[in-house]
Amino acid sequence: MTAEIRWHLTEFLPVNQESRPLRDLLHRQWLLPDRLIHYLRRRQHVLVNGRYQPVNELVHAGDRVDLLFTGDEVRTPTANDYRPTPNPRLAVLFENRDLLVVNKPRGQKSHPNVAGETGTVMNDVAGYLAGSADGAYMVHRLDLQTSGALIVAKNPIVVPVLNRLIAMGQIHREYLAVVEGRLTGAGKWDWPIGRDPRDPRWHAVDGLHAQPALTYYQGLAASDQRSLVRLHLATGRTHQLRVHLAHSGHPIVGDPIYNRASPEQMLLHGVRQQLLIPFTFQKHEIVAPLPTYFQEYLVKCKLS
């Protein structure tokens, strides 16, 4: 018995598409992992202009390419099994066939930590998509007290593509933070980050099993006690911005881990993403408006 097709993705190659082997299109241009390409080829689930085409044959401008998936090709076909939030209040910044970008509020988890947990962004996305053929699939996360733009995939096929684009630095993520002290000018921090040897739940520069980490920063406004800083993630280590800022001597205001003496709530917001859309790789700039409390704090500290 033929397995039911769960995901059917159709793409038309652009007029400026260079002729190349189908395998190169799938692997090098579209960045699909080898596992998916293996199943597409073995099951003849990749069609060019309506017929199966061996992956060593050429595709050309204007060709229609259909990708068919049953679900077992991906390692986590039920990764969207989040309990949907009824009538979710979700701030959607961008949406297309394969993904959406939402404006996560401060104080909301990105995803459940235990089975059956509710109230997270992923539960809200599952509720938003309820009744459609789409599901909520995790791409990356934001810390509990961080707000801003968060990418969620609507099918598992694009998850490894998006993860690879993030790892390659092709999806640019920009943040705003209010930090302690006077931080001016622009530069970069390339301090490696690993587990904090004093507490493995947290992270530290030159910690255990440290990995390379690169953050670009630019001071936008400063008073004697506070600064508004623009931050660009070139890598995506856990707590990277928070660890780098704390190590620089300018921890984020309200950071409950790396600035525990601060009584305020954390002021870190993912304000902008330069998103590359899978398959077409068109660029979209996504802007997540600053929360009201963030704007009011800037005014109070004379940083606006």
Image: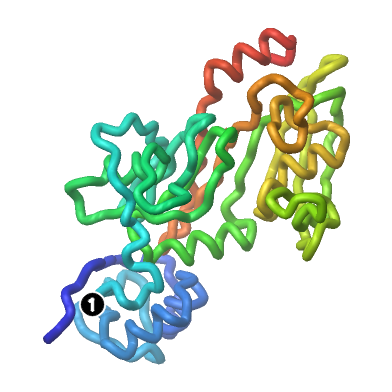
Which residue is at a point 39% across and 86% down the rendered structure image? 38
Q: In the image shown, does 295 or 143 lie closer to the viewer?
A: 143
**Badge 1: residue crowd in 10 Å (few <14, some 14–19, many ≥20):** some
In the image, residue 181 lies at what x, y percent? 85, 23
Which residue is at a point 65% across and 14% down the rendered structure image? 297
Residue 218 occupies quadrant: top right
Which residue is at a point 77% across and 31% down the rendered structure image? 259
In the picture as drawn, the residue positioned furthest to the left comes out as: 1
In the image, residue 260 lies at what x, y percent? 75, 30
Residue 245 occupies quadrant: top right
Quarter of the figure with the N terminus: bottom left
Compared to residue 157, the image places residue 139 above or below, namely above
In the image, residue 12 lies at what x, y percent? 31, 66
Q: Of the residues shown, which amino acid type is indicated by label 1?
A: Asn
Compared to residue 171, the image places residue 290 above or below, namely above
* Element at label 1: loop
Which residue is at a point 53% across and 16% down the rendered structure image? 292
Q: In the image shown, does 64 or 179 lie closer to the viewer?
A: 179
Q: What number of labels is visible?
A: 1
* Residue 173 falls left or right of residue 206: left
In the image, residue 189 lies at what x, y percent? 83, 47
Quarter of the figure with the C terminus: top right
Compared to residue 166, the image places residue 34 above or below, namely below
Q: In the image shown, does 62 or 235 lie closer to the viewer?
A: 235
Which color scheme is applied?
A: rainbow
* Residue 201 falls left or right of residue 19: right
Q: Which residue is mark 1?
A: 49
